[in-house]
Image: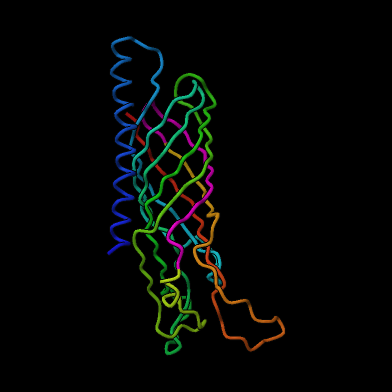
Amino acid sequence: MRSYANTRLFCQRLILLWLLLSCFSWSDASGQSRRRAPQQRFRAGLLLGGNFSQVDGDKYNGYHKASLLMGLQASAVLSRQSELGVELLYLRKGSKTETSSSLSSVKGLRNRHLDFQYAAVPLYLRYRWKKEGPSGFVEGGFSYARIVGIRITEPSSPTDGLLFRDIEGDLQRNEFSILAGLGQEFTKNLGLKLRYSIALNKLYENPEPPPPRTLSTAPPRIDYLRNYYWALMVFYRF
């Protein structure tokens, strides 16, 4: 119950932050219409897209887990070519890997799903190539995220001997990551961007020291887990 209450309070604070930034954006736009100011100082908008993620440390490669991403954004315009932005996102990270039950002859079946649901707050600096009109841009920054839901699906006796559900209670709920991206504005309000993100801290780290390399009969173990993802997003700004 305490974890649920903390997560709810965390989300409420993020929504309040976005609403405050949105109020600045709308009041600034209204003030500009009266003063006929040449540049809007605050902007708010919506984000919708998808991401492909993987978990380093699960013994498999590839960005096979696809999921939807959605959220809100607000930004402070620093100059005609730069702005400081913040987002409130709901996204899912994890992996979808190939493993089969020891009782089954099926091979190549992606039947292990690690599904971690996050509320994330990316903070980034964006630089536009042009001073006027729609432009391409690059951005980079950091993100804080917190797990709001976990779902692990896997065979009861996987052939690789790894059981991720056994470490669910030891997963790190808070995550800090770096992000970089590029995009294109099509109009003053509509645009598209691609983002890559790497977690700075590990989702899980085995507290036990690794066995000696000379011990070839050591049982399989999960040493650590770390999140990565690619995201493609459409955004609309007011």
Relative to the observer, which residue lies in front, 88 or 231? Answer: 88
Q: Determine the main secondary structure of the stretch shown in magenta.
A: strand
Query: For the point 44% across and 25% down, which residue is it?
Result: 77
In the picture as drawn, the residue positioned furthest to the top comes out as 35
Give the colour scheme of this rendering: rainbow
Which quadrant would the N terminus be assigned to in this image? Answer: bottom left
Query: For the point 48% across and 24% down, which residue is it?
Result: 78
In the picture as drawn, the residue positioned furthest to the front comes out as 2
Instruction: Name above or below for residue 233 compared with residue 94.
Output: above
Instruction: Name above or below for residue 45 compared with residue 97.
Output: above
Residue 183 included in the magenta stretch of the image:
yes
Q: Percent position (x, y) of residue 152?
A: 38, 71
- Total labels: the figure holds 0
Which quadrant would the C terminus be assigned to in this image? Answer: top left
**Does 107 sit left or right of 147 as displayed?**
right
Q: What is the magenta range?
A: 171-191
Q: Percent position (x, y) of residue 110?
A: 43, 72
Name the image quarter holding residue 121: top left
Name the image quarter holding residue 41: top left
**Does 11 sit left or right of 129 as displayed?**
left
Residue 105 included in the magenta stretch of the image:
no
Q: Percent position (x, y) of residue 218?
A: 62, 86
Query: For the point 41% across and 43% down, which residue is it?
Result: 233
**Does 16 sit left or right of 217 as displayed?**
left
Query: For the point 55% across and 73% down, which residue is it?
Result: 207
Instruction: Name above or below for residue 115 compared with residue 27.
Output: below
Q: Percent position (x, y) of residue 123?
A: 46, 40
Instruction: Name above or below for residue 98 compared with residue 102.
Output: above
Name the image quarter holding residue 116: bottom left
